């Protein structure tokens, strides 16, 4: 590892990112990225089964009975709490959709930050190359110094491209994919919660929610 080259690329990229975005936004994006890089253990099929079980319990007993049911998913737990409180369907939908919208916006901000870093890293790689070339030209009379200067000139561009294409851009794409996955699950939950509130048949609710899923995932449910 060439420390000067790495410092030019990483330090320059971070400094420029701080200029492009407020510090709070950058730090928030790092937290969002940490969340995105964690393995997503929430399966849409599991959420559907949980919603169907809740609908069955509400139909057999009462909606009030759902108050004591332990629910792991925070968004589903919030939706069921609103159902138990007797919230108007339109108001309930508005509350939950607002949360979905803000989740998407947080992820979009994170994507913009990391895409920006992906654009900046190669640029600072080129800047490092220019610095290395200038140093090399200044030391042409000293052969011992030409090698280190040439190393900075060549490897800094490599580091810039590597950081952009191996770290920053993949994280931005990962955020986009995770945002789509979370959005799907949250839309499932909204539809399921509204169906429970309307007192619909659990089998109808299941078929309605399965329609949200891609064919491959629906076949998995049929074969289960």
Image (spheres, rainbow, N blue to C red):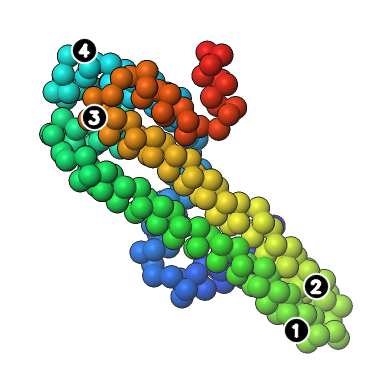
Q: Quadrant of the N terminus?
A: bottom right
| N-term-proximal mark, 1 vs 3 | 1
Q: Are marks 4 and 3 in contact (CB under 8 Å)?
A: no
- Residue 172 vs 16, above or below: the answer is above
Q: Earlier in the sequence, mark 4 or mark 3?
A: 4
Front residue (pair 219, 117): 219
Crowding near pointer 1: few (<14 within 10 Å), some, many (20+)?
some
Residue position marked by numbered label 2 in the rendering: 150
**Foreground disc of the pair 1, 3:** 3
Earlier in the chain: of badge 3 and badge 2, it is 2
Which residue is the site of mark 3?
198
The residue labelled by disc 4 is 60
Depth-wise, is mark 4 or mark 1 nearer the camera? 4
Q: Nearer the viewer, residue 19 or 221?
A: 221
Q: CA distance from mark 2 to mark 1?
A: 10 Å
Q: Secondary structure at mark 3?
A: loop
Question: At 49% across and 45% down in the image, what residue appears?
Answer: 180
In the image, residue 172 above or below residue 198: below
4 or 1: tag closer to the N-terminus:
4
How many discs mark residues in the rendered view? 4
Q: Mark 2 or mark 4: which is in front?
A: 4
Q: Residue 54 location in percent, x, y?
A: 28, 21
The residue sitting at 57% across, 72% down in the picture is 12
Q: Which residue does the image show at 55% across and 54% down from the upper left?
A: 172
Residue receiving disc 1: 134
Q: Earlier in the sequence, mark 2 or mark 4?
A: 4
Percent position of residue 63, x then y: 17, 23
Is residue 59 among the parts visible in the rendering?
Answer: yes
The vertical placement of 65 against 159, above or below, is: above
Crowding at dot 2, Cα within 10 Å, few <14 / some 14-19 / many 20+, comes out as some
Measure the C-alpha gap from mark 1 to mark 3. 72 Å
User: Residues under labels 4 and 1: Cα distance?
Assistant: 79 Å
């Amino acid at each position: 590892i060439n420390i000067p080259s790495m410092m030019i690329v990483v330090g320059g990229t971070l400094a420029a990112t701080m200029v492009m975005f407020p510090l709070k936004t950058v730090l928030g994006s790092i937290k969002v990225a940490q969340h995105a890089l964690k393995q997503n253990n929430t399966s849409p099929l599991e959420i559907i089964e949980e919603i169907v079980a809740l609908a069955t319990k509400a139909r057999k007993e009462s909606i009030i009975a759902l108050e004591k049911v332990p629910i792991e998913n925070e968004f589903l737990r919030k939706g069921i709490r609103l159902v138990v409180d007797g919230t108007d369907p339109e108001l309930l939908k508005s509350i939950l959709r607002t949360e979905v919208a803000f989740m998407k916006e947080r992820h979009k901000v994170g994507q913009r930050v990391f895409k920006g870093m992906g654009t900046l890293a190669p640029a600072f790689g080129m800047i490092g190359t220019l610095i290395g070339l200038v140093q090399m030209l200044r030391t042409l009379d000293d052969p011992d110094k030409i090698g280190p200067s040439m190393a900075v000139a060549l490897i800094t561009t490599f580091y810039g491209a590597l950081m952009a294409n191996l770290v920053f851009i993949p994280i931005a794409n990962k955020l986009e994919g995770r945002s789509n996955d979370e959005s799907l699950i949250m839309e499932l939950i909204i539809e399921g919660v509204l169906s429970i509130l309307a007192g619909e048949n659990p089998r109808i609710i299941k078929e309605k929610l399965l329609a949200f899923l891609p064919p491959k995932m629906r076949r998995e449910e049929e074969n289960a």
